[in-house]
Image (cartoon, helix red, strand yellow):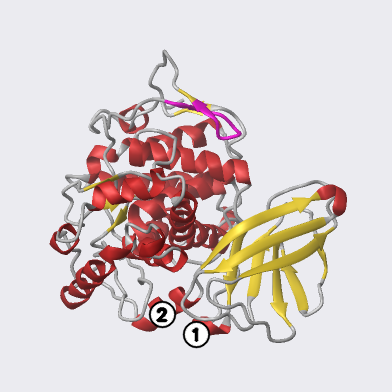
């Protein structure tokens, strides 16, 4: 069976000039200025190499400028393991470090043209190999310089977190980049690893990125949909409502088939995957990690819960949930960080956050069918699997944690291991303990 995919409550800018979009949220309708969409387009990039060789004390990050404008003075921020210190500046660069985030900025101009790649080198005090996390590249050509990302998760923790979310999205921990269908939720086609929607402003970001990497003449089957996507997005802007119609897309091709082929074709797969990963991280992962840092949440479990909620509810939705959780633990003034404020613990805060999210899902006639996704994080909390370092199963329903009034969502039970590998158990018992 196909699991119940999430409904959007989020707001975000689209990619290019005149392409800014958002979806209705639980607090009304909001549209971000077109300049923010333009900024995102100008700063679009893909990471093609990300390594740190401990024996050489040397890291390499290669990125490609996939935006619509040349970068002129890029800033590169990324996360390193706890205790690791960035300690060397290549000519033309200087750096600062806050906690586990190293931020490198230019001391002189540097031009990285559209579709050009740049190789960035750095060094640290670590003799153990690792992969830099939460890489974020900003530039004055964006129109503004966003803050560096907060500390994220390790590569394995992020993989485990994404395995879980993929169960809720596609009923399997294997990320389904080729998935596409119209689920009848009033948001057009829902496609790819995070359920990017044609009627809410994020699918267009994936396709714009893909067009920047590969032309129609070079095998890009999705390029022909950009005019239709633009029309749909502009219609959303004028109405403030998510767009259910896919007529403009259906008139030029088979969106679902072309989306699947773009990933299944070995020639185009890498570019198409890069764009889905990039938009996912920009819209969901990095903002979720920044929210975690703001509120003082340090465990992988709390970050995984925020990440999944960001994909499910979006920016406005998750901030509403955070405010409700803060109030529930005695922080009605929304003091940040909340952890440690008046003795508030991360355990207590996460419990309230999950309860508030449960209530939001249960209050909606469609969302209630996916309420079991919250129970999985509650079981992990009760078991104290804070670092996601112990294998676990999603053999838990909301009714197991909070009573029989909640329906069964029907997700297939999987076992997820600390390295992100997984299996399907032959037997299990539903429980929240």
| Pointer 1 residue | 143
95 is higher (above) or lower (below) than 63: below
Q: Which residues are magenta?
A: 414-422
Horizontal arrangement in the rendering, residue 2 relative to residue 186 (left or right): right
Residue 274 rendering spot, x and y as whole percentages? 49, 55
Q: Is residue 417 magenta?
A: yes
Secondary structure, mark 2, is helix
Residue 250 rendering spot, x and y as whole percentages? 16, 57
Q: Is residue 223 magenta?
A: no
Q: Who's the residue at 55% across and 48% down the image?
A: 346
Neighbour class for label 2 at 10 Å: few (<14), some, many (≥20)?
Answer: many
Horizontal arrangement in the rendering, residue 93 relative to residue 213 (left or right): right
**Going by the picture, which residue comes out furthest to the top?**
427
Query: Could you say which is closer to the camera, residue 100 or residue 51?
Result: 51
Q: Specify the label residue 361 is tagged with.
A: none
Q: Who's the residue at 21% across and 67% down the image?
A: 228
How far apart marks 1 and 2 lie (CA) works out to: 8 Å
Q: Specify the label residue 38 is tagged with.
A: 2
Residue 41 rendering spot, x and y as whole percentages? 44, 74
């Amino acid at each position: 069976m196909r699991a119940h995919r999430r409904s959007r409550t989020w707001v975000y800018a689209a990619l290019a000039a005149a392409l800014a979009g958002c979806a209705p949220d639980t607090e009304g309708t909001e549209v971000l200025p077109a300049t923010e969409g333009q900024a995102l387009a100008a700063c679009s990039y893909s990471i093609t190499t990300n390594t740190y060789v401990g024996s050489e004390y040397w890291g390499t990050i290669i990125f490609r400028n996939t935006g619509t404008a040349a970068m002129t003075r890029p800033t590169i921020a990324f996360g390193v393991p706890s205790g690791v210190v960035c300690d060397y500046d290549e000519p033309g660069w200087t750096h600062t470090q806050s906690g586990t985030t190293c931020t490198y900025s230019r001391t002189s101009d540097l031009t990285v043209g559209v579709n050009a790649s740049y190789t960035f080198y750095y060094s640290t005090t670590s003799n153990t190999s690792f992969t830099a996390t939460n890489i974020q590249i900003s530039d004055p050509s964006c129109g503004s310089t966003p803050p560096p990302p907060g500390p994220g998760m390790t590569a394995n923790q992020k993989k485990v977190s994404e395995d879980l979310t993929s169960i809720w999205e596609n009923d399997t921990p294997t990320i389904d980049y080729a998935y596409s269908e119209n689920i009848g939720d009033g948001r057009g086609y829902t496609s790819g690893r995070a359920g990017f929607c044609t009627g809410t402003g994020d699918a267009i970001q994936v396709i714009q990125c893909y067009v920047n990497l590969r032309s129609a003449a070079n095998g890009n089957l999705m390029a022909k949909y950009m005019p239709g996507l633009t029309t749909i997005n502009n219609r959303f802007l004028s109405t403030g409502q998510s767009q259910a119609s896919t007529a403009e897309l259906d008139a030029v091709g088979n969106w679902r088939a072309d989306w699947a082929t773009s990933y299944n074709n070995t020639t185009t797969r890498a570019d198409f995957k890069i764009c889905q990963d990039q938009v996912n991280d920009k819209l969901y992962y990095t903002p979720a990690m920044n929210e975690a840092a703001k509120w003082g949440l340090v465990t992988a479990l709390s970050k995984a819960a925020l990440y999944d909620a960001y994909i499910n509810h979006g920016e406005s939705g998750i901030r509403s949930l955070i405010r409700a959780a803060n109030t529930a633990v005695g922080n009605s003034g929304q003091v940040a960080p909340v952890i440690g404020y008046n003795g508030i613990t991360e355990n207590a805060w996460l419990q309230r956050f999950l309860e508030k999210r449960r209530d939001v899902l249960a209050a909606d006639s469609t969302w209630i069918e996916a309420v079991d996704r919250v129970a999985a994080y509650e079981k992990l909390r009760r078991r104290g699997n804070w670092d996601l370092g112990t294998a676990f199963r999603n053999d838990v329903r909301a009714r197991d944690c909070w009573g029989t009034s909640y329906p069964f969502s029907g997700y297939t039970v999987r076992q997820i291991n600390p390295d992100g590998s997984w299996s399907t158990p032959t037997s299990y018992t539903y429980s929240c303990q």
